Image: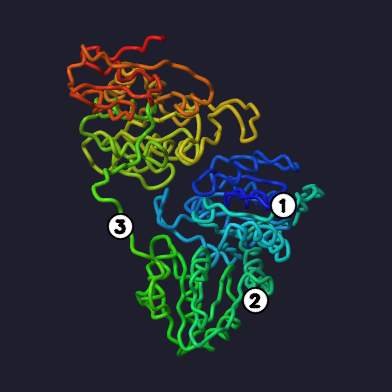
Amino acid sequence: MVRKYLLGNEAIAHACVESGVDFVCGYPGTPSSEVIDTLRMQQDRPYYLEWSVNEKVALENALAAAWCGIRALCTMKHVGLNVAADPLMTSAYTGVTGGLVILSADDPFAHSSQNEQDTRCYSHFARIPCLDPASVQEAHDMIPAAFELSEEFGLPVLFRPTTRICHSKGDVALQPAAASTRTGEFHKDPRQYVVIPAHTRVLHKKLNEKQPEVRKRLVEKGFNRYEIRGKTAIIASGIGATYVQEFLPEDISFMKIGAYPIDEEWLGDFVRKHEKVLVIEELAPEVEETVRQVAGCVPVFGKKNGYAPYEGELSPAAVAAIMIKAGFLRASPFVPSEPFPNLPPRPPILCAGCLHRGAFYAIKKVFKDAIYPSDIGCYTLGLQLGVVDTTICMGASITVGSGIAHSGEKRDVVCTIGDSTFLHTGIQGLLNAVYNGANMTVVILDNRITAMTGHQPNPNSGQTACGVETPPVSLDALCRACGVTFVETVDPYDMTGMVNALQEAKKRNGVKVIIAKQLCVITARRAGVKRGRYTVDPEACTGCGTCVRFGCPAIEFADEKAQINELCSGCAVCVQLCPVGAIVRESKK
C-alpha cells in the first residue's frame, strides 16, 4: 500500500485500475472529467478507453461491455445522466454480467451547471444501488465495492461523487493495480437482452425481488452505519456526514448513509430509539423521505419542515447553522466573516484571442435586432456580449431556435453552438429544423476541441482520447447531409469574411449554417502556434474605445488611450476594428 495526495477524481481513477476495470467511456462534464483524463494517462494495466460523442452513447457502449462479462466504467455529470436516462432505466431490467459502474458527478450550488439535480433520485427511480461518498478516501474505497455489488446482484451501480469530493484533495491509501484476467464474450439470451413486453414483465418482477437483499448488503458492507450515543440523533449523507462529524456533540447519536436503497427496517429501528432526529443531506430529501416513512411519532427535522435548504452546497458553517436551528447545537464554532468592501466584480470572461468573441461581434454587427439561442460551452459567456438569449441543455440552441422561428416571431433567429455540442446532440436539431422548414441561421463555433471541460478531444479533433490519429469529421459534409444548402466555413479572425458570410446568410430563407473555424487559443498555444503580438501606437490612438468595447481582456484603457497587455495572443481582430489604424504588430527586438 502507498499513500498519495490526490484530487478526488484522481483517487477514483486509481481505484478503477485497482479494481481491474476493462472498459472505460464517458462524455466530459465538470466535475467528472478528470476521471477519464487520469485513466488516459495510467499505464499500469491495459483497458479500452474512449471519449464518446454523448452520454447515451457512452452508457450503451459500457452496458454492452458489461453484458460480455468484463468490468466497465461510464462517466458523466449529473445533467448528462438525463441524456443517458433511456438506457439507464432499461439496464436495470436487463442487468449485467460483468460489473458496470456509472459515475454521475453531481454539482450542488451549480458551480458549472445549469441545474442542481440529484443523481440519487435516478437510483430510486431505476431501482439500482447508488454509492454516495463522504470523503476523497471513501470515494476511492467505494469503487471496488461498486464493481463487486454490480456483479453480485447483476445490476448497474450508480456512483455519485459531488463537486466537493471530485475537486478536493486528500491523502489517499492506494492498492496495487489488479491483473487483467477477463476477456469479453457475449452469451446470447434474448429473454434477458431483448426487452419486448413479454420479457420485460418478467424482468421487472426479478428486479423488484432483488431489492430486499440489496438493502441488507449495503448495511453489511458498512456503507450505512450508526452509533447510539444519546436520546437525539443526526442522520447525514455524502459530504454533509463528514461536516457533521467535525463538531458533533458527544451526547447525540449519529447515522451515516453512504448507499441506497436504505434498509427501512434497519433505519426504523434506529430512529425509534430517539426522541427527535435531524436529517442533513445535499439537494433532494432522499434520506429524509425514507426517515419520515419509518419514524412513526418521532419528530423529524430537515428540508420538509424548513430546517435545511433544498438548494445549494453544504459547508461546515451551513451544517452548523442547520444544527443550531433544529436545536442540536448550542452555538456555531465558526467566526462570522465579511468580504472586503468595494471589491470590483470579476465575472467569467472569454480568453484573450478566443474565436468566439470575434464571431459574436460579427453576429451582433450583422443581426442587430435578433433572437440569439445558444448552448452549453465556453461560448455561453457570449451572455456578457449580449449575444446569448437562451441556454437550456446540450444541443438545445438549434431546437429552441427552430421553435422560436416557427412561433411567429418576426425577428431573425441566430443560433450559436460549439463543435463538440453539435456532435453531442445538435445534429438531430439541425435535421429537424431543415426537415420542417425553419428560417434561421446556425453558427457552429468550431474550435476543434471540447474546451470548457478541460480540452478533451472529440470526433472533430483528429485524435481519440488515447491520442491515436483518426479522420476528423467534416462538419460541412454533416450539415449538407442534413439538407442545408447554404454552408460556409469562415475564419472568425477574418472579420471581413465573417461579416460577409453572415450578411449573405441573412439574405436567404431556410436554414443557413456558418462554421466559424479556428483553433481554441489555449490549444493553439500548447501546440506552439505563434502569431506574434500587437501594440497600440499612442500617437495614433484617439481614445475612441472601439477596441475596448470589443471586450478582449488583453485590451485596457488608461490615460485616455488604449493599451495591449501581455495576454495578447495575436489574433489581430482588434487591428481590423480600430478605425484609425492605431494597433500595429509589435516589432521583434
Left or right of 238, for residue 558:
left
Q: Which mark is residue 212?
A: 2
Q: Residue at x 53, y 81 (%)?
A: 253
Q: Quick check: 273 left or right of 514? A: right
Above or below, 532 against 344 in this view is: above
Task: Specify the amino acid type for callout 2.
Answer: Pro
Distance from Cα at disc 2 to Cα at disc 1: 37 Å
Residue 40: x and y in percent read 64, 39
Residue linked to disc 3: 338
Name the N-terminal-most of marks 1 and 3.
Answer: 1
Asked whether the residues under the numbered discs 1 and 3 touch, taking CB atoms below 8 Å apart as contact, a structural biologist would say no
Distance from Cα at disc 3 to Cα at disc 2: 50 Å
Tell me which label, 2 or 1, sits earlier in the chain.
Answer: 1
Q: Which residue is mark 1?
A: 2
Give how far across and how far down residue 497 sits, in percent: 34, 16
Residue 548: percent from left, percent from top: 25, 26
Seen from the viewer's position, the closer of residues 421 and 266 is 266
**Residue type beneath disc 3:** Glu
